[in-house]
């Protein structure tokens, strides 16, 4: 008789699969038909999900388009770079704040239940710390590298996004 315990992953091995996406056992478990599939992620993937990097790439692209309409991309490339970095940091912080505030709702929706906070891969306190660090860094970056007006507009935009959305 075949020893099922030797071929079946234990609970500890399944948890390691979640925390280590490079685990070959986890990849086999995902590919096996008839098994419940679980998404495996690493800390960097969780950071990208937490900051909604794909959505915020569009925010940065819109910022680039606005800068291009001004017509000073070539002559003002350093200001452009400072603006894009600061915008990305502040937009990421707004996304984190949104997920912190909506954690309980995210757990209930199929589309959002795999987010790091909703899935329990990240503690709320850690997410708040990440959001604050991103917000402070983005505001300082814009305030010192671009202008005080740019910083205040980014802060206003982030606040409106968190409160209204």
Image (cartoon, rainbow, N blue to C red):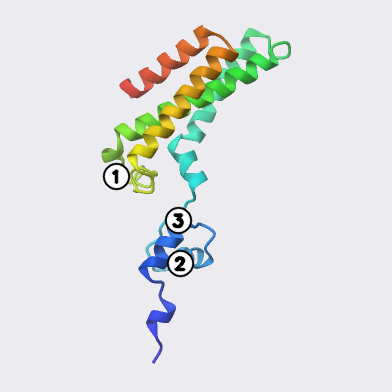
Q: Position of residue 76 (x, y in %)?
A: 69, 12
Disc 2 packing (10 Å; few <14; some 14–19; many ≥20): some
CB within 8 Å, label 2 to label 3: no
Depth check: give the residue in front, 23 or 124.
Answer: 124
Q: In which quarter of the image is the C terminus?
A: top left
Label number found at residue 19: 3
Q: Position of residue 150 (x, y in %)?
A: 52, 11
Residue at image coords 53%, 26%: 88
**What residue sits right under mark 1 in the picture?**
107
Disc 1 packing (10 Å; few <14; some 14–19; many ≥20): some
In the figure, residue 158 lies in which quadrant? top left
Between the C-alphas of marks 2 and 1, the distance is 24 Å
Residue at image coords 42%, 30%: 131
Residue at image coords 47%, 16%: 154
In the figure, residue 156 lies in which quadrant? top left
Residue sticking out furthest to the bottom: 1
Residue at image coords 54%, 30%: 57
Depth check: give the residue in front, 153 or 127.
Answer: 127
Label number found at residue 35: none
Counting residues from the N terminus, which is met first, the one under dot 2 or under dot 3?
A: 3
Q: Where is residue 17 in the image (x, y as percent from the top left)?
A: 45, 61
Element marked by disc 2: helix
CB within 8 Å, label 3 to label 1: no
Q: Which of label 2 and label 3 is nearer to you?
A: 3
From this view, report whether residue 49 is shown above or below residue 137.
Answer: below
From this view, report whether residue 17 is shown above or below residue 126.
Answer: below
**What residue sits right under mark 2 in the picture?**
29
Element marked by disc 1: helix
Depth check: give the residue in front, 130 or 32.
Answer: 130
From this view, report whether residue 105 is shown above or below residue 152.
Answer: below
Q: Which of label 3 and label 1 is nearer to you?
A: 3
């Amino acid at each position: 008789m075949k020893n099922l315990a030797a071929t079946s992953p234990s609970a500890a091995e399944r948890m390691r699969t979640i925390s280590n996406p490079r685990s070959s056992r986890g990849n086999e478990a995902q590919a096996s038909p008839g098994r419940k599939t679980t998404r495996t992620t690493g800390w960097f993937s969780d950071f990208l999900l937490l900051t909604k990097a794909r959505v915020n790439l569009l925010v940065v692209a819109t910022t680039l388009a606005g800068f291009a309409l001004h017509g000073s991309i070539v002559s003002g490339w350093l200001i452009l770079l400072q603006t894009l970095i600061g915008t990305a940091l502040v937009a990421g912080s707004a996304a984190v704040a949104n997920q912190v505030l909506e954690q309980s709702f995210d757990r209930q929706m199929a589309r959002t239940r795999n987010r790091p906070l909703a899935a329990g891969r990240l503690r709320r306190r850690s997410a708040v710390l990440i959001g604050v660090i991103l917000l402070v860094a983005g505001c300082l970056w814009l305030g010192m590298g671009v202008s005080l007006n740019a910083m205040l507009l980014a802060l206003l935009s982030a606040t409106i996004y968190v409160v209204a959305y």
